[in-house]
Image (cartoon, rainbow, N blue to C red):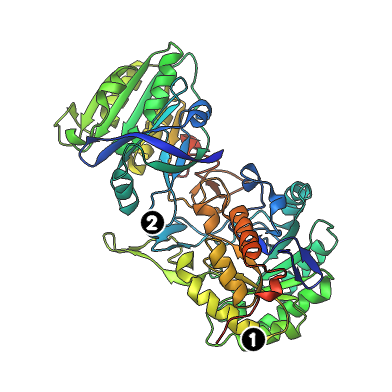
C-alpha cells in the first residue's frame, strides 16, 4: 500500500536513508532489519580513497547540525569488496551515491557499478558543499551545464536508474532540474546540506576545521519543502525529498509537496530507529486516512 | 549496541557544576567495558540537536545500575542536570572500544579534569583483578575534584591541583614522572584535556611504558557511520581514525599529537 516507484525501481515503501548518514548500513543493521527500508542509500564513494577534511567536522546548531566530513571514503574498489556483499543479504534496494572531480570520473564510477547486480540505482552527488569542484569552486549543481554533462556521462555508462542530487543554493531550481531531466536522470534528489558557518565567540574561531560546512536537520526542512515543490512542478521525473525529515509527519509533508520518496539523514544520528519508525508512521497515516496509493497524496498541496 | 530508555535513579550534584547520574540499565551494565561510552539524548526543544557522548563512569552487573559523570558545559549538559529520579533518559550504547588491562603491570591511572569520568570504572576493573593501581587525579582547583572517596576504594590516590588547593601544586606530569622513575614495570591509562594527554604520551614514550589514552571529540552518530570525529594517526593506510568507533581508547604512540 505504501509502495512507490522511481522509474523502473519499485520500492516497498518511500523511505530511504540519506547518503552520508547511514554508512553502508552495517552499523544500523544492529538496531533494525534493513529490509524494512525502501532503499539504503550508501555514503558517497569516489574512484580513489579520500581522507576527508581536517577536524573538527561536526557542530551542533539549533534544530540541526553543520558537518564538513569532506567525502571521506576508501574508494569504489573497497566499497564493492566490503559493502555490497553485506548489503546483498537484505531485502531492500541498494542505491550507491557517487562523486568525482569531473564528468569523466562520474562516468567511470557508473561504468564500474553498472556490472554490480546488488546495485539497484546510482545517486549522482552533484552538490556536496564540502569539496571544491571545477574552476569556480562552486557546486556542480549550481551550474546547469556541468550538471547536464555529468548526468549525460553517467547515463552513457549505465542502464540502472540514476538520481541527480541537487543543492538548494541556487536562485531558481528549474534550469538545473530540467537540464538533469534532459540529460537522462530518472529522478532528482533534493536538497543536499546548505553551505553554512558556525563560530565560537569565545575563541573567535570557526567551529569546523574546514571553516564552512553543510547545515542539515530540522532547521532546513522549510527550505527543502520549497525546493521539492518547485522541482516537482518543473519536471516530469520523480522527486526524492531530503532535508530535515525527523519523523513521519515531516515525510508526509514532503509527499504532499510532490515527493515520490523521502530520505532520512541527520535524524539517524538523533534516533537510530528513525527510519523504521517513519515507515511505520507513514503506514499508519495511510491506513487511518484510507490512502490506498501514494499518488493520492503526492503533490496534492492545495494552493 | 542498543538504544533504550533508562529510568533515572538519582542525579546528584557532586561538585560545583558536576553531576553524577545513576540509571537503570541492566543490559548496558552487563555489556559495558571500562573506556566505552554512551550517547544520551539531552532533550530540549530542538537545541541541542545531537546526542552527547559520556564515558561509562560506573557499571554494576549485580544491580544493573550504570552511572555517567558530567560537568555542565553547555545547553545539553545543562538540560541533563535538570533531569531527576523517575525521568527516562534515551541512551545508545555501549559504544566504542575499551581499555586493555595490561596484566602483571603496575597500573598508573591518570585523570585530568572531567577526564576522570571513564577512569573510575577502569579502576574498579583493575581492583577486581587483584592487582594494584595508583590513581593520579588532577584539576585546576580542589572544587573540581569529584568522586575522590570512591576512587580511594580502588587504589592509592595521588592528587595535584594547579592552584595547590588540594594535593601538590603542579600539573599531573610531576607526580606521574616521579612514579615512573621508580617503577620500571608500569602501564599508563589516561583521560583528560588534550594538552595533558600529549604530556602523558611523552612521559610514556620517555619511560617506555605502554600508554593508553581515551580521547574526546565532538560526535554525531557515535558508531562509525558519519566519519565526524576523526583523530590523525600515524598510519600508512589512513590519515584519520574515528574516535567513536576505532577509539575512544588509543595507544598513545599511534596518535599524531
Q: Nearer the viewer, residue A200 or B28?
A: B28
Q: Residue A94, how many percent across, how many down?
A: 74, 58
Q: Residue at x 64, y 86 (%)?
A: A233
Q: Nearer the viewer, residue A298 or B27?
A: A298
Q: Residue A148, how many percent across, how many down?
A: 71, 83
Q: Residue at x 40, y 20 (%)?
A: B124
In the figure, A97 relative to A229: above or below?
Answer: above
Residue A52: name its quadrant: bottom right
Residues at discs 1 and 2 in contact (Cβ within 8 Å): no
Q: Residue B167, how many percent across, how many down?
A: 18, 26
Total numbered badges shown on the rendered structure: 2
For mark 2, does the 10 Å Cα neighbourhood hold few (<14), some (14 to 19), or many (20 or more) residues?
A: many
Q: Is residue B207 visible?
A: no
Q: Which residue is mark 2?
A: B48
Q: Nearer the viewer, residue A234 or B245?
A: A234
| Mark 1: secondary structure | helix
Q: Residue B133, how many percent across, how many down?
A: 37, 17
In the figure, B154 relative to B247: above or below?
Answer: above
**Could you tell me which quadrant the N terminus of chain B lies in?**
top right
Label 2 marks which chain's residue? Answer: B
Residue B204: name its quadrant: top left
Q: Which residue is mark 1?
A: A233
**Could you tell me which quadrant the C terminus of chain B lies in?**
top left
Q: Residue furthest top?
A: B130
For mark 1, does the 10 Å Cα neighbourhood hold few (<14), some (14 to 19), or many (20 or more) residues?
A: some
Q: Is residue B146 visible?
A: yes
The nearer-to-camera label among 1 and 2 is 1
Amino acid at each position: 500500500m505504501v509502495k512507490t516507484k522511481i522509474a523502473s525501481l519499485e520500492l516497498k515503501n518511500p523511505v530511504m536513508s540519506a547518503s552520508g548518514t547511514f554508512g553502508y548500513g552495517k552499523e544500523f543493521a544492529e538496531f533494525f532489519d534493513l529490509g524494512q527500508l525502501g532503499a539504503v542509500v550508501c555514503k558517497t564513494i569516489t574512484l580513489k580513497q579520500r581522507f576527508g577534511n581536517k577536524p573538527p567536522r561536526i557542530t551542533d546548531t539549533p534544530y540541526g547540525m553543520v558537518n564538513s566530513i569532506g567525502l571521506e571514503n576508501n574508494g569504489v574498489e573497497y566499497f564493492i569488496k566490503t559493502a555490497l556483499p553485506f548489503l546483498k543479504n537484505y531485502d531492500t534496494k541498494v542505491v550507491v551515491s557517487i562523486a568525482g572531480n569531473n564528468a569523466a570520473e562520474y562516468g567511470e564510477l557508473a561504468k564500474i557499478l553498472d556490472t554490480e547486480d546488488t546495485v539497484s540505482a546510482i545517486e549522482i552527488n552533484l552538490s556536496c558543499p564540502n569539496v571544491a569542484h571545477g574552476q569556480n569552486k562552486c557546486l556542480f549543481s549550481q551550474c546547469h551545464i556541468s550538471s547536464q554533462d555529468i548526468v549525460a556521462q553517467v547515463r552513457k555508462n549505465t542502464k540502472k536508474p540514476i538520481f541527480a542530487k541537487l543543492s538548494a543554493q541556487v536562485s531558481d531550481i528549474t534550469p538545473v532540474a530540467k537540464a538533469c531531466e534532459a540529460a537522462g536522470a530518472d529522478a532528482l534528489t533534493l536538497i543536499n546540506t546548505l553551505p553554512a558557518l558556525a563560530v565560537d565567540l569565545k575563541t573567535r574561531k570557526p567551529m569546523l576545521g574546514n571553516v564552512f560546512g553543510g547545515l542539515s536537520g530540522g532547521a532546513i526542512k522549510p527550505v527543502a519543502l520549497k525546493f521539492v515543490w518547485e522541482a516537482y512542478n518543473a519536471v516530469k521525473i520523480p522527486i526524492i525529498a531530503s532535508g530535515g525529515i525527523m519523523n513521519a509527519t515531516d515525510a508526509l509533508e514532503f509527499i504532499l509537496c510532490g515527493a515520490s520518496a523521502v530520505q532520512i539523514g541527520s535524524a539517524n544520528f538523533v534516533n537510530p530507529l528513525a527510519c523504521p519508525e517513519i515507515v511505520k508512521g507513514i503506514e499508519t497515516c495511510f491506513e487511518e486516512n484510507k490512502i490506498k496509493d501514494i499518488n493520492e497524496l503526492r503533490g496534492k498541496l492545495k494552493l | 549496541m542498543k538504544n533504550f530508555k533508562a529510568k533515572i535513579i538519582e542525579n546528584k550534584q557532586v561538585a560545583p557544576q558536576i553531576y553524577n547520574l545513576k540509571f537503570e540499565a541492566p543490559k548496558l551494565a552487563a555489556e559495558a567495558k571500562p573506556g566505552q561510552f554512551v550517547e544520551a539524548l539531552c532533550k530540549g526543544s530542538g537545541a541541542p540537536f545531537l546526542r552527547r557522548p559520556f564515558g561509562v563512569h560506573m557499571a554494576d552487573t549485580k544491580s544493573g545500575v550504570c552511572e555517567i559523570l558530567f560537568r555542565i558545559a553547555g545547553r545539553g549538559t545543562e538540560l541533563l542536570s535538570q533531569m531527576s529520579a523517575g525521568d527516562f533518559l534515551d541512551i545508545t550504547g555501549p559504544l566504542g572500544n575499551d581499555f586493555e588491562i595490561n596484566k602483571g603491570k603496575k597500573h598508573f591511572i591518570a585523570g585530568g579534569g572531567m577526564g576522570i569520568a571513564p577512569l573510575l570504572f577502569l579502576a574498579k576493573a583493575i581492583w577486581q583483578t587483584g592487582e594494584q593501581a595508583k590513581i593520579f587525579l588532577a584539576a585546576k582547583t580542589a572544587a573540581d575534584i569529584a568522586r575522590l572517596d570512591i576512587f580511594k576504594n580502588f587504589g592509592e590516590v595521588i592528587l595535584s591541583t594547579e592552584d595547590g588547593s588540594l594535593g601538590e601544586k603542579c600539573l599531573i606530569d610531576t607526580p606521574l614522572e616521579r612514579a615512573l622513575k621508580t617503577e620500571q614495570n608500569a602501564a599508563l591509562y589516561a583521560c583528560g584535556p588534550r594538552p595533558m594527554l600529549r604530556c602523558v604520551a611523552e612521559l610514556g614514550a620517555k619511560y617506555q611504558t605502554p600508554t593508553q589514552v581515551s580521547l574526546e571529540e565532538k560526535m554525531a552518530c557515535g558508531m562509525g557511520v558519519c566519519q565526524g570525529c576523526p583523530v590523525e594517526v600515524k598510519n600508512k593506510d589512513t590519515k584519520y581514525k574515528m574516535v567513536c568507533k576505532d577509539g575512544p581508547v588509543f595507544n598513545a604512540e599511534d596518535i599524531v599529537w
